[in-house]
Amino acid sequence: MIKKYLHTRFRVSDMEKSIIFYRDILGMKVVEQKISPRGSKLVFLSFPDIDCELELCSFPDSGSVQVPEDLVHLAFEVDDLNMCIEKLKEARIPITEGPLESSKGTRFIFTEDPDKYEIELMQYRV
């Protein structure tokens, strides 16, 4: 059966803007870039010491990405939510919801990547 989760693929409309968001804002590292046999550009990103990747895919001249309204989000745990909020503000990336706090003390916000994929950043109470 299934051994492990490997990656999630997002189609993006502007690869460079997406790389900047995931690399420079969220801190992911580009681990591989290539052109697929069908001509799409593929970029794989991951966090250090995490055995899972985000695959960004862009097709030449395919236009903007239409993200379904009910698409679930990606969630990432962070060490310092306040620092993340400041980094997003400095980059002029809007926080779409939050900061909020769960009944267990977990603080979180929502933002969006350049194609409007929803991203949740969470800081667990220590």
Image: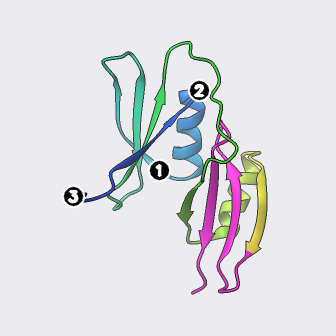
Give the residue type at disc 2: Asp
Please state which of residues 29 and 104 is positioned toward the viewer in this rendering: 104
Of marks 3 and 1, which one's residue comes earlier in the chain? 3
Q: Which mark is residue 14?
A: 2
Q: At numbered mark 3, what does the secondary structure look like: helix, strand or loop? A: loop
How did the renderer colour the structure?
rainbow
Could you tell me which residue is drawn at 40 percent across and 29 percent down?
A: 42
Q: At numbered mark 2, what does the secondary structure look like: helix, strand or loop? A: loop
> Which stretch appears magenta?
101-126
Could you tell me which residue is drawn at 28 percent across and 59 percent down?
A: 4
Q: Which mark is residue 28?
A: 1
**Magenta stretch: includes residue 112:** yes
Q: At numbered mark 1, what does the secondary structure look like: helix, strand or loop? A: loop
Q: State how far apart marks 2 and 3 are (Cα).
A: 36 Å
Give the residue type at disc 1: Met
Compared across the picture, whether 58 is left or right of 94 comes to: left
Please state which of residues 8 and 70 is positioned toward the viewer in this rendering: 70
Could you tell me which residue is drawn at 62 percent across and 28 percent down?
A: 65
The residue identified by callout 3 is: 1
User: In the rendered image, which quarter contains the N terminus?
Assistant: bottom left
Mark 3: few/some/many CA within 10 Å (<14, 14-19, 20+) = few
Tags 2 and 1 touching, CB below 8 Å = no
Of marks 2 and 3, which one's residue comes earlier in the chain? 3
**Magenta stretch: includes residue 11:** no
Mark 2: few/some/many CA within 10 Å (<14, 14-19, 20+) = some
Q: State how far apart marks 2 and 1 are (Cα).
A: 17 Å
- Position of residue 31 measured from the top left corner of the image (x, y, whole percent): 34, 42
Could you tell me which residue is drawn at 78 percent across and 54 percent down?
A: 96
Closer to viewer: mark 2 or mark 1: 2
Tags 2 and 3 touching, CB below 8 Å = no
- Position of residue 75 measured from the top left corner of the image (x, y, whole percent): 56, 60
Compared across the picture, whether 104 is left or right of 60 comes to: right
